[in-house]
Image (spheres, coloured by chain):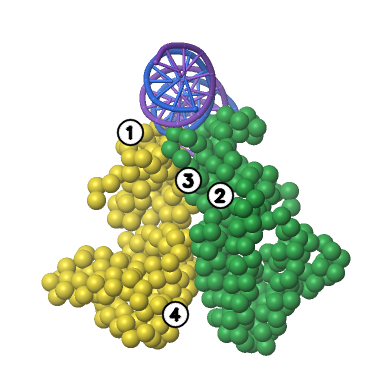
Chain colours: A green, B yellow, C purple, D blue
DNA sequence: TACAGAAATATTGTTGAACAATATTGACAT
DNA sequence: ATGTCAATATTGTTCAACAATATTTCTGTA
């Protein structure tokens, strides 16, 4: 698990480290990332750091302003709406054409069971992690490496938005049962119903997210 | 039209130039791209060039091998199957939820009409270009900047595959009428039928592509 | 001749310093 | 307080260097 990807180029490893900082909320949205400071911090040259910045900018996690530097991307209503549009397209699409015997369904089932156990124990971080596993497994149903990669990118962007939430522990919790219903529909070979249920789920989650952003902007 | 994006960073401009070379087939699949040769050719530093290479690698147009350099990506059956899986997900999904009054439908209609005219005149390049406009407009139906960007990336990868075809002029030609049928269904507010038709279209195109790749590998 | 191994060469991976161009800051005058 | 202009810091890009890894060339031996 401590795979620091030694074979990969330095820029890729750097990008991964910085991405971790971003989605863990250690770098706040809007914050400027000085080249000098970060190349010092990670003990790499400015050139290598700039390559990493460029990768993360392409992923939408950083924003680049000419001659002014890179900043942590600031979630907006527009970006949240767009991200959920992508999720509806990918997740509902993957579910609709899901084949009952697909191995990813077992992964989904396990994630739901784990989330339920962890919710009982009050392990909200565990619930969130299981929830993420669940949705990634849904994309796996489509058997496409490109869709998986794209979903991962958008997913990271969404986690950046999570940083705005004051009580993230309760964000995923209400959705555990909906996940259970969705995987149950798949197990009964009702993919269209599963997709419809997921659309409801995502619309609800989108509203929750937008409401949270609204509160966060009011505070500021 | 001659917007060379002077405001953008050098690496981005470079990436665009190289991308043009890639999709126009001037750089052959599998070919190695020497850092020294290309930094000389474009009159930029190796560092800037490496940034551009990294961007294109992330787009799937180049492949990076540690300590060996970057190579033009080589299309495989697996990549073609994957790309068409993405297209079915995105294009059929966009069509299925299309709203009859969406402005992109007019763009689709115009593209079809133009393609028909150009086909009569034997302008195969024009037909191909109009076809591309048509499919991009389909993605526009989903009103998502992220889906648009993703489609553009996958679309570039597909154009890399087109380079393998010996007679690309006849690839798009048979599909002009199918495009016409699809946009007609949208105009009649039958999005589900349009999506179904598109699925047929894409399955056919996928088989054509795979057959072409097979022939190309036989030759080699 | 064929071939294994070693030396020589070329290429990539990464760094550090340099300098121009642009942005930000601060001092000063009104 | 406000606007102007010099001083400073930051980014954009290049260049030269060197270690690490690949590739090629050379060489001696079976």
Q: Earlier in the sequence, mark 1 or mark 3?
A: 1
Left or right placement of residue B91 versus residue A89 in this view: left
- Asked which secondary structure carries label 1, the reply is loop
| Residue ID for mark 2 | A74
For the residues labelled 3 and 2, say whether their Cβ atoms are less than 8 Å apart.
no
> Number of numbered discs present?
4
In the image as oriented, which residue stretches furthest toward the left? B121
| Residue ID for mark 1 | B43
Q: Say whether residue A31 is visible.
A: yes
Q: Earlier in the sequence, mark 4 or mark 1?
A: 1
- Asked which secondary structure carries label 4, the reply is helix
Q: Say whether residue A9 is visible.
A: no
Disc ID at residue B202: none
Residue in view at x 58 percent, y 81 percent: A196
Label 2 resides on the chain identified as A
Q: How far is disc 4 from disc 2 in space, using C-alphas?
A: 32 Å
Q: Do marks 4 and 1 both belong to one polypeptide chain?
A: yes
For the residues labelled 4 and 1, say whether their Cβ atoms are less than 8 Å apart.
no
Q: How far is disc 3 from disc 2 in space, using C-alphas?
A: 25 Å
Q: Count neighbours of disc 2 (C-alpha within 10 A) and say few if under 14, some if 14 to 19, many if 20 or more.
A: some
């Amino acid at each position: 698990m401590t795979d620091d990807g030694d074979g990969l180029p330095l820029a890729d490893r750097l990008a991964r480290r910085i991405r971790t900082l971003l989605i863990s909320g250690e770098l706040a949205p809007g914050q400027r990332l000085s080249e000098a400071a970060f190349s010092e911090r990670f003990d790499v040259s400015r050139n290598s750091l700039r390559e990493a910045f460029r990768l993360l900018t392409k992923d939408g996690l950083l924003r680049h302003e000419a001659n002014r530097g890179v900043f942590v991307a600031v979630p907006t209503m527009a970006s949240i709406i767009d991200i959920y549009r992508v999720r509806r397209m990918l997740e509902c699409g993957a579910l609709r054409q899901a084949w009952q015997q697909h191995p990813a369904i077992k992964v989904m089932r396990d994630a739901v069971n784990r989330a339920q156990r962890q919710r009982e124990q009050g392990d909200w971080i565990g619930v969130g992690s299981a929830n993420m596993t669940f949705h990634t497994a849904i994309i796996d149903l489509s058997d496409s490496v490109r869709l998986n990669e794209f979903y991962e990118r958008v997913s990271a962007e969404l986690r950046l938005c999570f940083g705005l939430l004051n009580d993230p522990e309760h964000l995923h919790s209400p959705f555990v049962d909906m996940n259970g219903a969705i995987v149950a529909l798949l197990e009964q070979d009702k993919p269209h119903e599963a997709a419809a249920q997921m659309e409801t789920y995502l619309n609800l989650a989108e509203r929750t997210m937008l409401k949270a952003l609204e509160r966060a902007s009011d505070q500021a």
